[in-house]
Amino acid sequence: MSDRLSIRDGDVDTAIVTRYERTRREALRAGLGTGAGVLAAATIPGLLGVRSAFAQADGDAEVLLAAIRLEQTAVVAYGTAASSGLLDPAFLATTKLLRGQEREHADALVAALRQLGGTPPPAPRARDIPGLRGLGDQREIASFALELETMAVAAYYEAHQKLRAAPLLRTGAQIMANEGQHLVLVREALNRPPVPNAFETGKQ
Amino acid sequence: MLQDPVCRRRLLGLAGLGLAGSSAAVLAACGGGDSGVGGGGGLGKTTELEPEGTAASRDVLVLNSALDLENMAVAAYRAALPLLTGAALNAGKTFLEHEREHADALTEAIRQLGGAPNKPSRGYDFPRLAGQRAALTFAADVEGTAIAAYIDALPRLTSPDLRGTAAAIVTDEAEHLAVLSGALGRPQAPRAFVTGKA
């Protein structure tokens, strides 16, 4: 393992944005509208940047870094949603629950990374998460959350094919299972089937 | 979740994953490992009791343990369905189908590895279920047991693809548990780390 750890998911690259725009245009042509919920998982450029870090990660430390960044993004996103004033009491409570659990994930992963000698990345700012700003109502926020959680499940699914250490594999599975439960809460809030597939891979 | 550890042991025993047999040996070994990052084990600690044999034969052993659980879950949902109504019945039907899909996938994976899939037990000595709430509680117990077993066993799989599949299944089981918990009036995501243990 290298002594130096680097974060590979810096600014979103042009190709990712281009793919997003193409997907959005295709959705519009298909008459599906522009809401986040109608687009496939991880089509928001900022989320794709986090997502691509998982795809590029190689080795336990790099996977941990990508996972921390993902969890930090979720904490910020849910915190922003919780303070938006747009949520009814029930979904506000759900949002606060999810934020707290994402923070627990992040804390555990940071501790694990430090055991490997790594340094955790700084948390992103809300304005660094494209797609987060401009969400106008609870349904849009829930749709964003659906995409965020779906991406998280997909990322951890891939991580299980890369992680080596048994404790990390178990922790990853425990977190991925929790993200699946988050998906249930968000899908129910959106009146969608709570468990649509027998294999939860985060792919739609 | 299984509140009663005796009941958990009973369920594991019903699935053939108790204290005897090769499948049990795998899970017994799994139980001796670290519980995760928060479990107090160092990340460098990778020494766990490994079954003997080739990588493929070890994977077959783990997969057959999982298959035993899935077959038990299929039987459990079949036992619970007659007691369910409305939304709970619809969920139960969906989850029964999911468990069948898991069993089919595991059977296929075992065959691809050159192994012989375990057959379902001829019968399971399930507890008597009196009404919908008992049926939902029983289903939740079965899901919790499966989650705990998968998480313990997952690192023993040598194939990265199979580890991914196991993670996809355990996440599905956790989603089932969330729905069942909701139907029982319990918190649907009570913990940030889903262990399947009470």
Image (cartoon, rainbow, N blue to C red):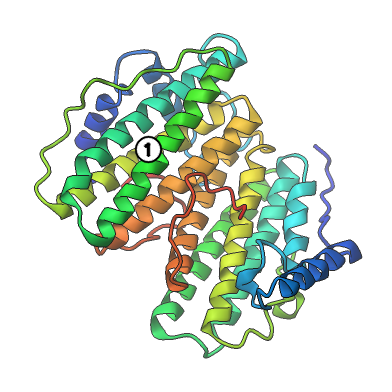
Is the residue B148 above or below the residue B106 in the image?
Answer: below
Q: Residue at x 36, y 47 (%)?
A: B95
Q: Which residue is mark 1?
A: B146
Type of amino acid under label 1: Ala
Is the residue B188 above or below the residue B46 in the image?
Answer: below
Is the residue B99 above or below the residue A23 in the image?
Answer: above
In this orientation, does residue B36 appear?
A: no
In the figure, residue B91 lies in which quadrant?
A: bottom left
**Residue A88 spot, x, y in % from top left:** 43, 86
Q: Nearer the viewer, residue A142 or A127?
A: A142
The chain letter for the residue carrying disc 1 is B
Q: Residue furthest right?
A: A14
Q: Nearer the viewer, residue B165 or A190?
A: A190
Assign a secondary structure to mark 1. Answer: helix
In this orientation, does residue B18 appear?
A: yes
Q: Residue at x 58, y 34 (%)?
A: B163
Q: Nearer the viewer, residue A43 or B100?
A: B100
Q: Nearer the viewer, residue B51 or B178?
A: B178
Q: Taking A36 as reference, is B99 left or right?
A: left
**Residue A92 spot, x, y in % from top left:** 45, 80
Q: Residue furthest front?
A: A30
Is the residue B86 above or below the residue A175 in the image?
Answer: below
Q: Taking A126 as reference, is B116 left or right?
A: left
**Residue B14 spot, x, y in % from top left:** 25, 26
In the figure, residue B10 lies in which quadrant?
A: top left
